[in-house]
Amino acid sequence: MAHEDVLTTGAVGQIKFQLHVSRNPSSFQPSISAAEKGQAQNLETLSFTLSSLHRLKRFCSMSGFEVAGIVLGSIPIVVSALQCYMNGLGTLQNFRSYKRILRSLILTLKTEHVNLQNICEKLLTGIAPQTRIEEMIRDPFGDLWREEEIFNKLRLRLWVSVQVFDDRVQDMREAIQQMMEKLNVGADGKVEWAESSSIRKQFKRATFILQKSNHEEALTRIRDGVSALERLAVLNTDLETQRKSRSQGRLNKLVNGMLSGIYHALRSTMTCKCSDLHDVGLRLTPPSRTVVPEDDDEDIIKELQFRLAVSYLTGSQVNTSKQWNEILLRSGDDSKMSTVSFTAQRTCASRKTVGFAVPSTTPSTNSQQSQTVVIESALSNLTLNTLRTMSEPLCSKHINNLCETMQTMGKKKQGERCGHIQHCSMTETKRYDVYTLECLGSCEEWSLVPLKQVLQDPALLYGDKLRLAWMIACGVLQMQGTPWVADIPRSEDIFIAQKGGVHQFQHVFVLRHFPEDPRVNASVSPNNPFMLYLGILLIELILGQSIATLDSPQTQTLEPGLPRHILDYEAANKLLGRVMMTGGSGYYNAVERCLRSDMQIAKSKYENRICRALARKWSRPPYRNMPCFVYINGYPGIGKLTIAKELQQLLPSSKIYHNHLLIDPIDALVERSSPGYHEMRTGLRRHVLNEIATSEYTKDTTWIFTDARDASAAGEMGAKDYEAAARKRDVSLISIVLECEIEENIRRATNPARNQSISAKLTDETILRPILEKESIYRFGNETELVLDVTKLSSEEAALRIKEHVDRLAACP
């Protein structure tokens, strides 16, 4: 969308220019109107003025980040100029005292240049690909610094400090320009008189230029600017994750409200007596709109656009056929003229998209002569042969019967507004403008197919599954609680467009039928958690099968009477290992978050029944899990051995080898302070692990190890011995790190009952407390490691959590 600012600038004489500043350079067309005829200046002056205005336009359209690139590229130019001066001064005896000043200036600028480069890299990390970051640093004047996608992501990262960032880099740019002017750096970046002969001729001027005091103010502004930007970059980057969540939550709330209004507006306008129901498919589009606190809700709502596929009947009552039209809905506008532009390129990306909206941009400001709102919609899948722009008058027709409008839509131009539908509540009336997009054709040409039917389609590739998962997850979360989705999302409720018999995996819909049957409105049930079933839907998508076919008969053997969602949770939980192997860690994390968000088993009213049922099920012969090494690491007294014993009851064919089986034999021989004590422990540990790793008698055993290894070099070496043994046995090492609040850890460690079975356990608080406060537990740091806070968990609960984690990672495919 053309986002225009209007500047009025007095030119030479009495000629006045109205300059429209646009991000698109081709749209710059100043108009000249003389106040009085015959007072126009000569052509040379006019040309110069237009050139100046063009530079002004270019400057005004820059983002702060683009200016940062200019500053980054300008500092080396100033350094080069100073270097030229220093080279010239080398031949002049009287000027050699100034070389020290020049070296200081050069070093200061180089330091700030490196700091600014680091700031830009930090801001770009996670926003732009690494290859692009390198390219941007190499070419600070390049086009990548003007990319709208990067700017929008940076806008979210900087949050409310965008304007401060812009002001800071602009101040730095002015300081750089000030130095360049004083150093006589030309437009081409070269020093105009750096040769020694020229400097000799202009002795006094050179003396003035090279005085450090003349540049101190500019250097201070640059240093202060870089320092401020560094703080902004660090603090804003640290807070970005939480801000993204708030931004998306705010956007989802706005989209959710508008979708509810659209549904009720459709329901009120689709009350026809047709022989068949109208199918209305709402297309899912992932959100790409950046929402920051400065954005006004009304402005965001005006940008929201939704694509719907609507079916209707044509022909006589005897011989009817179902046809499909695609329409666009957006919030009603009160402006005098509404223009909708559709681009001809299929893959064109616009500057802003939001929720289920097709790509759009922001409305323009009002000019002095007319009030015009321009909405450019670069629809991601709309193909037109020409660029069309249509305008509608102020009064929009209220569509009382959308069915009749569908019948005549084929006669309208693509992008033309057909009128508006509205939803009247007790407090306000919401209007939604309806625009025609295209006639999709008959059911034989275009239709919607349930996702459940295409899960096993060979054409559904891994990349398609990931894109579908993203669109579906974003979409149903925005629609949660609206009539567009049921109380639980299922694969049969998501639809894929089919055109000419070919599935269009990039076109995803939810489907509703009108006129609506009031009996189909189901209330949200607390026994059907929304997020749980979203996670199950994602599992079905990545594994290519429905949960019913993936579920094992053993799930059904849980205690009778358990609710359906408990059984579904157990079935989904067993599949997480396959999700990890098929979809990767990112997909796995998303699915696990969905499953866990609604399922707090330990706090459920079914806790005891579930634990009993799960214990019985897991005590059966091994069904899915492969042998593995479970390495439980934690501070002394945290409860490692107690948890390990509970875990042994849940893991079939498992054995425990706790760390005191290695410590106590050595303690019985020598004191811990004796020379060679640690070498003896290391030798015993490696001997035992080698036997476990190589013995045929233990090859089918899952070993549970406990340890208390800190993050020191010695601690890491001991932990790595277990990893090496797992590698030798060719099994997985599953690391479990236990954490606990210090006071609770000490309470457990000093419990008198703790020393009854093992005498060498640490129970002295004066020794333990410094360890807990100063030392860190060793972590492998891999994505399969489980860090579990057991402060408020019983040993049984902790063992269940570990068992779930082991199941996911050691499950047979």
Image (cartoon, rainbow, N blue to C red):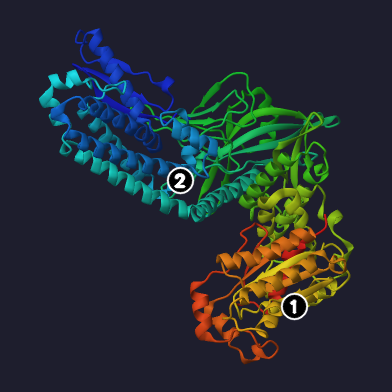
- Dividing the picture into quadrants, the one containing residue 811 is bottom right
Q: Callout 1: few (<14), some (14-19), or many (20+) C-alpha neighbours within 10 Å? A: some
Up the image or down, 217 lies above or below 369; here it is below
Answer above or below: position of 523 versus 416. below
Is 531 rendered above or below residue 404? below
Residue assigned mark 2: 122
Q: Position of residue 614 (x, y in %)?
A: 80, 72
At label 2, which amino acid type do we have? Answer: Lys
- Residue under the image location 64 percent in, 54 percent down: 480
Q: Which of 472 and 772 is in front in this view?
A: 772
Q: Quadrant of residue 61?
A: top left
Q: Of helix, strand and loop, which one carries label 1?
A: helix
Whether residue 528 can be seen here: no
Say which amino acid is labelled 1. Glu
Mark nearer the N terminus (1 vs 2): 2
Mark 2 is surrounded, within 10 Å at the Cα level, by few (under 14), some (14 to 19) or many (20 or more) other residues, namely: some
Say what secondary structure mark 2 lies in: helix
Q: Which mark is residue 646?
A: 1
Instruction: Indicate which disc residue 350 carries.
Output: none
Q: Nearer the viewer, residue 525 or 430?
A: 525
Query: Horizontal and vertical percent for residue 326?
Result: 67, 32
In x, y percent, where is residue 628? 78, 64
355 left or right, relative to 705: left
Residue drawn at (10%, 26%) of the image: 204
Residue at position x 40%, y 40% in the image: 117
Relative horizontal placement of residue 624, taking residue 271 as reference (left or right): right
- Left or right placement of residue 403 versus residue 417 in this view: right
Q: Which residue lies furthest to the front in this view?
A: 675
Q: Residue 463 or 195: which is nearer the viewer?
A: 195
> Of residues 481 and 323, which is closer to you in this image?
481
Q: Residue 382: x and y, percent?
A: 64, 28
> Gap between marks 1 and 2, in whole Å?
46 Å
